[in-house]
Amino acid sequence: LHEVPHRVIEVDPPRIDLAADGEAARRHEHTHLCFLNSYAEVLVDGWLGHLARALAQPGVAMAGATGSWESLSDWRRGTPAHNLYDLVRLPWLRRLYPRFPNPHLRTSTFLAARERLGALGLERVRDKPSAYRLESGVSGIIPQLRAAGERAVVVDRDGIAHEEEDWPASRTFRSGDQERLLVADNQTRLYDAASPQERRRLSANAWGQAR
């Protein structure tokens, strides 16, 4: 970044990405902040403007590059049976995560108002399980937005903002060839490299029959 105007924020001790996002939001003075994790790869020019215009729509509190309907309480959808370990964990998981479909914005790339981020509880994220709960749990980001009368949208490479019900057809995350994806990450690359059979499984986990 030596040719790019920037300010480094060091987080000590090192924290998981959402907790680091929360710390950055606390230290910055900007009204809006965009976060990309270390796997993010911008695919098109004007990507940030696309997210900003989507966020400016009435009632939109967060705009991201990808979303999913997947639920960690149903993560083996499309397989013939659960193994014993999964069956033992299911009652616990179903207290923490809504059943499928469970629309949630994936936090690999997202834009939001700093004030809104401060109310989401990012600072309470301590590890991967707590990050998953904030991203897609029963008290996660989307339920908090809904309780406030707000919503999240997925934005594609053409700048079109897709509502929750349209995410399966947006061709951004595990949909089609992901040809309308705005910002890639490790999970979208996994889908790109998968066999047709594995793509069907991943798509079924994300979208069920809506794919």
Image (tube, grey):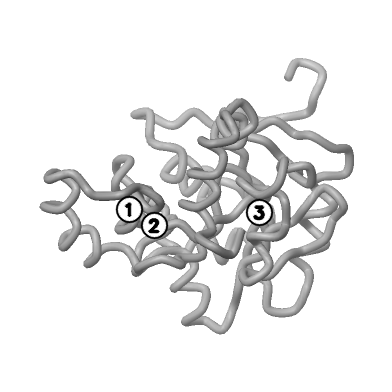
Q: In the rendering, which numbered label is found on residue 124?
A: 1
Question: Picture quarter containing residue 199?
Answer: top right
Distance between the alpha carbons at the discs numbered 3 and 2: 15 Å
- Label tally: 3
Evaluate if marks 3 and 1 touch, with contact meaning CB atoms under 8 Å apart: no
Specify whether 106 is left or right of 183.
Answer: left
Label 3 residue SS: strand
The numbered mark, 1 or 2, whose residue comes first in the sequence reads 1
Dot 3 or dot 2: first in sequence order is 3
The answer to whether the residue labelled 1 contacts the one labelled 2, judged by CB atoms less than 8 Å apart, is yes
* Sequence-wise first label, 3 or 1: 3
Residue at point 82% right, 47% down? 157
- Residue drawn at x 35%, y 47% is 79
* Residue at (74, 44) in percent of width and height: 181
Residue 45's place in the image compared with 155, above or below, is above
* Residue 64 visible in the shown view: yes
Crowd class of label 1 (few under 14; some 14 to 19; many from 20; radius 10 Å): few
CA separation in Å, label 3 and label 1: 21 Å
Residue at image point 73% right, 65% down? 162
Q: Is residue 31 visible to the viewer in this orientation of the structure?
A: no
- Name above or below for residue 48 compared with residue 192: below
The quadrant the N terminus occupies is top right
Give the numbered dot on residue 134: 2
* 133 left or right of 55 in image: left
Residue topped by disc 3 = 64
